[in-house]
Image (tube, rainbow, N blue to C red):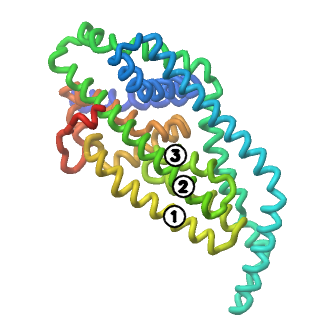
């Protein structure tokens, strides 16, 4: 075996061991990664306040207070919606039984005999609502150790301004390696800022649209659309399923079709027009790599891994680019026609 092949096998084995270790330590790794993600979001307003001569301690305190209010509000919303859904469950079950009977009678008019038990097995709104609930519970479970996460965020923000100096002191070739870290920070901040804005607008549109249609719990489905919009490719589809089935059971097939149409228009406009307009190719990842990273990190870390799949993959890509011997792997992770990142004043803001 050649030395190059042996070195490659050692690298692959090391990566497998690292992945297994991360999965085994999921309970410890997930809160830390979530804290790093929240700190990345919070860093922008903290530095903005600092530039306006607000003391660092006061800036961090104000931003952390806002984060706590948001998290407490989200938790209260989920708890209230779960209670209200339990109260209305008998109504949904009654509507579902009537819908099944109407479907059987309609199909019988075309001489198609389908047992009612078959429809009862597949036309079950509880399946989709349970799926949505599992997603929310997974995220809320990661937030259950909220004090540790918030404390970690505070320490990360307090140390953020000293990171460049420390990196410059420990790197062997700072003039060569520091631009990689700076580019990574710009890419991640830009991605999170744009993705958060697009996700928030998507959630607001879904909330308003479902409220106008009269679908129950529009605020809950809007929040679910906001959260799952971070998940590439399939997040928006998953977010639409429980709302569509609830509209079917609560209001009937016509309103379910209207709900589908609303989600499709929203996701096409926001996902295929607005987001690419501002995101461009600045992330430097191919579409296939984005999808595979979603599957991989979702398997390793669960719902939080799906949420953070793109930033985590970008971290790996930057690390590969920093080493000349692994630079070819970073090139394979990139898009088909790589373009340099263009950072203008609006992006940095």
Q: Is residue 21 visible?
A: no
The total of numbered circles placed on residues is 3
Q: Can residue 181 be seen in this view?
A: yes
Q: Which of marks 2 and 3 is nearer the N terminus?
A: 2
Q: Earlier in the sequence, mark 1 or mark 3?
A: 3
Query: Does the CB distance between marks 1 and 3 fall below 8 Å?
Result: no
Q: How crowded is mark 3: few (under 14 residues within 10 Å), some or many (20 or more)?
A: many
Q: Name the residue under label 2.
A: 206
Residue 47 appears left or right of 183: right
Q: Mark 1 points at which residue?
A: 262
The x and y percentages for residue 92 are 78, 62
Query: Does the CB distance between marks 2 and 1 fall below 8 Å?
Result: yes
**Which is nearer the eye, 86 or 65?**
65
Tell me the element at label 2.
Answer: helix
Query: Which quarter of the rendering shows the C terminus?
Result: top left
Residue 77 appears left or right of 41: right
Residue drawn at x 53%, y 36% is 304
Q: How crowded is mark 2: few (under 14 residues within 10 Å), some or many (20 or more)?
A: many
Q: Which labelled disc corresponds to residue 226? A: 3
Q: How far apart are marks 2 and 1 (CA)?
A: 8 Å
The x and y percentages for residue 52 are 34, 18
Q: How crowded is mark 1: few (under 14 residues within 10 Å), some or many (20 or more)?
A: some
């Amino acid at each position: 075996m050649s030395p190059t092949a042996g070195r490659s096998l050692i690298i692959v084995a090391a990566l497998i061991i690292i992945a297994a270790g991360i999965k085994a330590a999921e309970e410890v790794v997930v809160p830390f990664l979530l804290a790093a993600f929240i700190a990345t979001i919070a860093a922008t307003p903290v530095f903005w306040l600092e530039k306006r001569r607000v003391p660092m301690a006061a800036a961090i305190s104000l931003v952390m207070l806002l984060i706590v209010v948001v998290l407490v509000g989200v938790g209260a919303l989920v708890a209230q919606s779960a209670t209200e859904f339990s109260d209305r469950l008998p109504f949904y079950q009654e509507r579902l039984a009537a819908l099944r009977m109407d479907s059987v009678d309609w199909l019988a008019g075309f001489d198609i005999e389908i047992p009612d038990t078959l429809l009862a097995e597949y036309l079950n709104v509880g399946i989709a609502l349970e799926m949505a609930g599992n997603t929310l519970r997974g995220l809320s479970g990661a937030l259950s150790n909220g004090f540790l996460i918030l404390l970690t965020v505070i320490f990360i923000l307090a140390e953020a301004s000293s990171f460049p100096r420390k990196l410059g002191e420990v790197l062997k070739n700072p003039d060569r390696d520091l631009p990689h870290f700076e580019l990574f920070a710009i890419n991640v901040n830009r991605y999170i800022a744009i993705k958060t804005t697009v996700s928030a607008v998507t959630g607001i549109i879904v909330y308003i649209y479902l409220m106008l249609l009269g679908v129950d719990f529009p605020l809950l489905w809007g929040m679910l659309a906001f959260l799952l919009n971070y998940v590439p490719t399939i997040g928006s589809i998953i977010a639409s399923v429980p709302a569509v089935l609830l509209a079917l059971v609560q209001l009937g097939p016509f309103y379910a079709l209207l709900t589908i149409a609303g989600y499709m228009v929203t996701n096409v406009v926001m996902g295929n027009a607005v987001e690419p307009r501002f995101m461009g190719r600045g992330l430097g990842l191919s579409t296939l790599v984005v999808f595979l990273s979603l599957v991989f990190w979702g398997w390793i870390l669960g719902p939080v891994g799906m949420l953070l799949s793109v930033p985590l993959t970008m971290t790996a890509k930057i690390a590969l680019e920093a080493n000349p011997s692994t630079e070819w792997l970073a090139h394979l992770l990139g898009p088909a026609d790589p373009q340099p990142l263009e950072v203008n004043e609006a992006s940095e803001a």
